[in-house]
Amino acid sequence: MSEDWKIYRTRFLTRARQLTEPLTFNDSFGREHRGRPGDYLVHSADGARIVRREIFEDVYIMMESQSYESPRQGSGLNGPTQEIRELLPPVHPM
């Protein structure tokens, strides 16, 4: 997986990293997420998910300014599990 988080927007700001190797994780609802190299791990206030490369690169637009305020801790019902938290940027209370 690439080292740097980049900021993208659709209707909302998100952070994403492109996968360089396969990644599988379960969210807090027990749903399994699987990604292949080239797909994106996306982190937002709703939690973490994987978006296929074709969809991500068609829908998301990278922000020129890369300053970002992380979503508030506990703001999403399906926050990332411990395994995926290690891959996500730290969340700082606002």
Image (cartoon, helix red, strand yellow):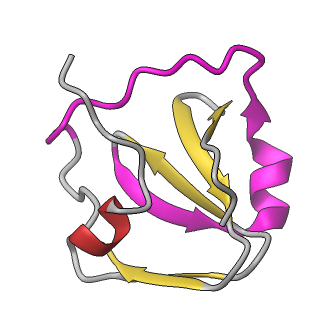
In the rendered image, which quarter contains the N terminus?
A: bottom right
> Whole-percent x and y of residue 88?
42, 53
- The quadrant in which residue 26 appears is bottom left
Please report the bounds of the magenta region as a residue range: 46-75
Q: Residue furthest left?
A: 74
Residue drawn at x 18%, y 52% as measured from the top left: 77
> Whole-percent x and y of residue 78?
23, 59
Give the total number of marks visible in the rendering: 0
> Whole-percent x and y of residue 34?
55, 84
Q: Is residue 40 above or below residue 26?
A: above
- The quadrant in which residue 84 appears is bottom left
Q: Does the magenta run of residues contain 43?
A: no
Residue drawn at x 35%, y 53% as measured from the top left: 47
Q: Is residue 12 above or below residue 42?
A: above
Left/right placement of residue 17 relative to residue 46 reads: right
Left/right placement of residue 41 relative to residue 74 reads: right
